[in-house]
Each structure stands twice: as C-alpha cells, then as structure tokens.
Amino acid sequence: MNHTPTIDQSPDIAEVLRLHREWWESNVGFDIPRMEQVFPESGREYLMFNFNGHPYFGIDEKKALWGWYRERIAQPGGLDVRVMRLEVRGDTAWLACEGRIDAAQLDGGEWTADGVDTPLFRATEIYHRDSTTSEGWRMWHTHISPRPEDNETRPGFADTTESRGLGWTPWSSPAKGKSA
C-alpha cells in the first residue's frame, strides 16, 4: 500500500504510518493477531465506528467482530488505501485516508451491510502515545464510512475521485497506480 504522505518522516510519523499499514493490511484475511498489535492491549477505551455503522469498544469487541466477519465474508482480494493527511501534535496524531476493498463478499453476494453496498470507503484514525506503558503509539479511534462511486461528481465542483485520483488533496498529488 502507498502510505507515504508528502511530509517529514520523523520517527513519530514513521511509527504512525507503520501502524496504519498494519491495520489495513491485517484487514485482508481478517488477521486478528496482526490487527491486535495496532490497538491498546486492554480496556474499553478504544472506540471504532465500523463501516457497518455500529460502534465497537475495546480489543475484545473488535476480535469478536472480526471472528463474525471471518465466517461470513469471502477473503478480500486486496485493498488500495491512500493517506490524504497526517498530523502529529505532541502525543496525539490523526490520519485521514480513502480507499477501496477488492472482491469482498458478504453472505455469498456483493459487499452489503446495513444498507452499505459499496467497497469504497474513507477513514479517520486517531493515535495516542502513552509513555507510561510499553505500548507506545496505538490507534485509539477510527471512523470508517462509505465514499461515493469513483465517477460521481463532487457537488460544487466538476471533478470526481476518478479524475482526481484516490488520495488526492488540493495541496498534493496522489501516487499513481494501485497500491498493494
């Protein structure tokens, strides 16, 4: 996957990008041990607003969700995720990205969950560094939601995701080609 924004590669930025990459790559095959390393080890402080529209609290609920998905969803063929923005301020970082899931299926049909019928998404991730534990940086919140189809015109503008490129921002250009 291409996760390199056009910003300084400080050790904190490098670690947040590493965790971001681990998170998204663990989604392919619902790799629970790999996924667990991205989040706080215990407690219910972690909060996820999942693509399915429901909230999940703590690593135990996240593992239960992935176990449920693993039984029902065909293995995704891959992901294309692009970072749009990343900021680190002290012990907190936030990252915005967008992407697409390839060939995911639910219940033997197309990707559908509670009215969501697209493999296209956007996500915001919040990271926190806790120097009082051995965990260092960990993701404490993520919010994943659907994004429009690639050829849907953006209201107020005459462009589309397809014309801009996945991960486009007004102040940078996205990496061309598909990330792995």
Image (spheres, rainbow, N blue to C red):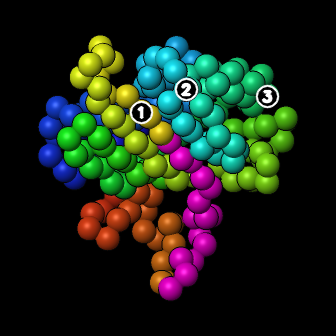
**Of residues 126 and 174, which is closer to you in this image?**
126
- Magenta span contains residue 91: no
Range covered by the magenta-colored residues: 142-156
Residue 11 position in % (x across, y down):
17, 32
Mark 1 or 3, nearer chain start: 3
Residue 93 position in % (x across, y down):
30, 43
Mark 2 or 1, nearer chain start: 2
Q: Residues within 10 Å of mark 3 (few under 14, many from 20)?
A: few
Q: Residues within 10 Å of mark 2 (few under 14, many from 20)?
A: some
Q: Secondary structure at mark 3?
A: helix
Which image quarter: residue 92? top left
Which residue: 26% across, 68% down?
A: 171
Q: Amino acid at mark 1?
A: Met
**Of residues 80 and 47, which is closer to you in this image?**
47
Going by the image, does 2 lie left or right of 59?
left
Pair 2/1: label in front: 2
- Magenta span contains residue 154: yes
Q: Amino acid at mark 3?
A: Arg
Pair 3/2: label in front: 2
Which residue: 16% across, 40% down?
A: 9
Mark 3 or 2, nearer chain start: 2
Prevailing SS of the magenta stretch: loop
Instruction: Say which residue label 2 marks.
Output: 44
On screen, residue 76 above or below 2: above
Which disc number belongs to residue 139?
1
Q: Amino acid at mark 2?
A: Arg
Which disc number belongs to residue 72?
3
**Of residues 86 and 98, which is closer to you in this image?**
86
